Amino acid sequence: MGPCRRRLRGASRGRLHPRWSRALCRADPALPGAAGYPLHRDAHAVARPRPAGGGRQHRGLLTRHRAMLSRTRGEHATREENAVDRDRMSGVTIGQLLERAVDRFGDRPAYVFAADDRVTFRELSERVDRAARGLMALGVEAGHRVSIWMPNNPEWVYLYLAVARIGAVLVPINTGFRVDEAAYVVGQSDSTMLIVSERFKYRDLIADAQTVLADDRVSARTLLVVGDNPPDGAVGMETLWSRAAEVSAEDLGKRTAAVDPDDVVLTLYTSGTTGFPKGAMHSHKVIRNMADAAERMRIGSDDTLVLYLPLFHVFGAAAVLTFAYTGGCIVLMEGFDVERSLELLERQRATVVYGLGTHYYDQINHPTFASRDLSSVRFCFAPSTGDLVRLATDKMGLAVNGYGMTETTSITAVPSPDDPEELRADTVGRPLPGFEAKIVGSDAETLPADTTGELVVRGHPVMLGYYKKPEATAAVLDPEGWFRTGDAAQLTPEGYIRYVGRIKDMFKVGGENVDPIEVETILMRHPAVSMAAVFGIADARLDEVGVACVQLKPGANTDESELIAHVKQRLAFFKVPRHAMILDEFPKTASGKIQKFRLRETFLDQQGTAT
């Protein structure tokens, strides 16, 4: 996702850093700092001019904001009860979390799947238990790794929770990965089983999965297919359900009772925005982080979330646990479709919205947005830029920024809805309980407040390590448990984090530092630009110069010289890109993050062709 606090049983645990136990168990909410989340760091798609027109979603907007602020001011006794409950989450497994949800929210809706198929928490638990017994019958043991390669669907949720329930480790695979990338993940993770759906968009995932299993790097031999027509040699869901009868409830109970909160439960591979993925290991203790995030964002049992973020992504996987803790309802989409998402937000009366900058921008600029009744939306989690947070607040519901990454269990820092807009938009908030954060210089010295340096964090939500990559782990985790995020940031005297940008993304023009996000923000304020990405390339005279890649709004028109002039009027000369390139579409991961390394390759290829 780093350090493990206990020796592995099998290969699912390991003592990577023997001195981390006390540091990682620390969970002091009074700490002034902790770190976080550039979900926004890779999703540069916001600061655009606001579209004209109000629409029905503006009716009662002020009332909704006031109601939100009123809701956040719960009685002191209730807050104390919640704090005690969250503390208990540090010693709970995901299987026990589901049992708690049944006890507290049994017949309340947990999920709405396609065609309004509503599933209560009690029904969810029954299906998860049946899937868990089926997996046991198929030979999945505690500590085994199970890869899953498919889009969001009900079985994804059931199998995710079932794998966790029996002490195995889930290894989600990005649906945007090609066969070679997927084979690398299945092989490098030592998975014993691969789960796929029949198709995803234009892809035949069964055929791709068979190619993966034939790869020399892969030892997995069991293929579980979610669909009606599993091929010869594969196991279908009907077989899984029927074989569940071979394992008694008593045997399942013994297996689940043996699961320890310190056990690895998820190995999440980085999304490949900068290169080849690494598997970040997380234990069941991620639950505590989700409980703390829910409290900070005031998410409760009356909330409904339309989830189009992919479950293979840490953001989506975390939402499943957050709503299992709060008792809220998730309306699950297979993936993001802008018109369908707006339809469901309206029809299902969603109260909470999770999304990246690309999602919010596409929704707000969709032709039907102004006519949608989104008055039920009271809160938007929008980890991106300050301009996006303000836009989402104006058009949808009170929004907050945020910070996190695969290695730090999704949400590391987030503002409170109580915070003024300046803090909700222009900082990524305060660290959640359980995190410590500081800003360090190039020699690892701690820097004073309001000074830019590298953000480093530690605490129980930090990953246990990169699977079978001790050198990569040691490069980002020191013996005292501090994780180097690779992000430039500042820490205010009040403990709020100002995100500056990826250190590796920053470049120097003639000795002057250039922050790509600053230039991207200016570009996206051009009326023709929908998305922008800026990076540096080598230059013989200045060491590096900037390249701006932009995607235009539908029907818009501009050229490279106009874009460069737009920046030149607004920023210092050394920040102005030397080159600009207009693209029809940006290369992205399946979760919507822009892949700058591919943009760089495209630009350099074009330059080579031109010369």
Image (cartoon, rainbow, N blue to C red):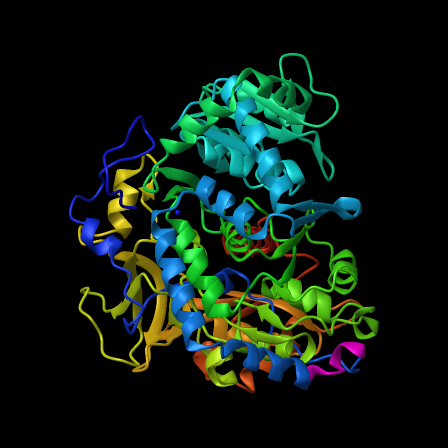
Give the image location of residue 492, x and y in percent.
Answer: 33, 80
Give the image location of residue 383, x and y in percent.
Answer: 52, 67
- Prevalent SS, magenta region: helix
The answer, for residue 167, to whether it is visible in the render is no
Give the image location of residue 581, x and y in percent.
Answer: 62, 64
Residue at 59% in and 28% down: 130
**Is 574 located above or below residue 283 in the figure?**
below
Q: Is residue 59 magenta?
A: yes
Front in this rendered view, residue 93 or 269: 93
Is residue 476 toward the left or the right of residue 305 in the image? left
Front in this rendered view, residue 75 or 263: 75
Give the image location of residue 367, x and y in percent.
Answer: 82, 69
**Is 30 located above or below residue 254 in the figure?**
below
Residue at 42% in and 32% down: 256
Give the residues in magenta. Answer: 56-61
**Is 307 located above or below residue 296 in the figure?**
above
Spot the residue most to the top: 232
Front in this rendered view, residue 138 or 316: 138
Residue at 80% in and 75% down: 370
Front in this rendered view, residue 104 or 527: 104
Q: Is residue 123 magenta?
A: no
